Image: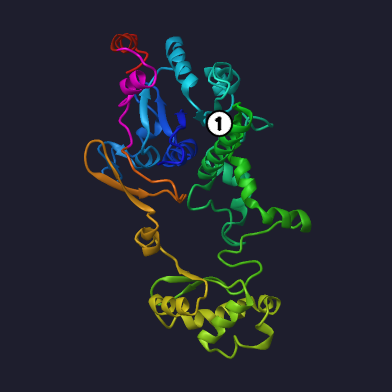
Amino acid sequence: MKALEDVVMLDLTHMLSGPYGAMILTDLGAKSIKIEPPGKGEGTRALQAKDPRNSLHGMGSYYLTLNRGKKSVCIDLKKEEGLKLFYQMVKKADIVFNNFSAGVPEKLKIDYKTLSKINSRIITCSVTGFGETGPYNKRPSFDMVAQATGGGMSITGTRETSQFRAGIPIGDLGGGIFGAIGILAALHQRTLTNRGQHVDVAMLDGQISMLNYMATMYFLSGENPYGIGNSHFVHVPYNVFETQTLSVVLAIITDNFYESLADLLNDDFLKQEKYKTQPGRFVDKQKIEECVQNHFKNQPAEFWLEKLEAARIPHAPVNDFEHALKDPQVLSRKMVVDIPHVDGGSFKAPGNPVKLDDHSDTWESPPKLGEHTDEILKGFLGKTDEEISNLRQNKIIN
């Protein structure tokens, strides 16, 4: 059983933010019908498609990862007959998910106001850079634009080297995550009201939300925070420490953890009475972290990881992708999965992070362009072979 197996989603998304949100819902079992323009299809199909290191059977890593388990139907929504066909699908669907620029759904006549007249229970979601209201709503936006506008880039790095974007595209991914959350909330509310609604998600709003308590600190103090690298503005020691091999992270956030660390290192400097509580440690933050670093540099990471684990001190190796994706904890949680490809073979990708007791993860190939057009038109809409042939002849589908 899958959690969302009775939910039908029409996926009009492209690139990253929208497809990621739709992928989350697909992984949870939604029947995802990917509506693509005839010809070239959705934009991510071309990304890395011809890169032999990052593609499989003509599908690049972007497309492979984001579109597992979806079904592809090619419909020309710019033609009246294609739009009519899409409306027939809307009548039987639960969700229409897009990440077109603000105003485009209205132009294409696929906005909530239009679709709700066809199906009052339909839930639509638009993920855009700045949302559908406000002075910036028509501005184009991609991941780094959202990160920059949202303030997070100003504290990434150090005071001297700040203004770095996050290594993973949290602007895009955050938009997709909040889009999926909004859709799930709307699905639940529909059980109470029997009505659908529109979900308006801005990538910028997601970035502001993720400022979280740091935004509140700014409002209370009036002081702009600045980048402090890998350290913490309260806790000590909280940083990355070099060893003879890998770097190791310590995250000492309580006095008990600090006491355990001081005992482990058996250093009289660290055991001073004034360092037994956080305020005293913070005053001498640099001295404490230099002392810890002097210990760590004398042994390989494996030595320290074993000692820290035994003492139950919060720690971690700074993993590169190779180490992260073969970490025993990651593998035990099935966060690396094998996904079959329709043309043979398989590829590995991150799994589903949402673990539900009564949900079973299964993995299906990302679709070829228009692979399921006939299947969906017959099985979902009840079209005859003759009707499908006429639609194809008129270049409404392919």
Is 67 above or below relative to 89? below
Residue displayed at 64% across by 47% down = 209
Residue 113: horizontal and vertical position, in percent? Answer: 61, 20
Q: Which residue is found at the position 46% from the left and 10% from the top?
A: 80
Give the residue type at disc 1.
Cys
Residue 390 lies left or right of residue 106; in this view the side is left
Q: Quadrant of the N terminus?
A: top left
The image quadrant where one finds the C terminus is: top left
Which of 63/298 is in front?
Answer: 63
Within the image, what quadrant is residue 331 found in? Answer: bottom left
Depicted 145 relative to depicted 310: above or below: above
Q: How many marks?
A: 1
Q: Is residue 255 left or right of residue 378?
A: right
User: Which residue is drawn at the image coordinates 48% and 25% (left, top)?
Assistant: 93
- Tell me the magenta residue range: 366-384
**Seen from this angle, which residue lies furthest left?**
344
Can residue 369 be seen by looking at this rendering?
A: yes
Q: Main secondary structure of the magenta part?
A: loop
Task: Give percent across and percent down for residue 109.
Answer: 54, 17
Question: Can residue 53 be seen from the camera position used here?
Answer: no
Residue positioned most to the bottom: 268
* 45 or 213, nearer to the observer: 213
Give the image location of residue 163, x and y in percent: 58, 53
What's the coloring here?
A: rainbow
> Does residue 320 belong to the magenta stretch?
no
**According to the image, label 1 marks what residue?**
125
Q: Position of residue 355 (x, y in %)?
A: 45, 51
Residue 114 picture quarter: top right
| Residue 379 within the magenta-colored segment of the rendering | yes
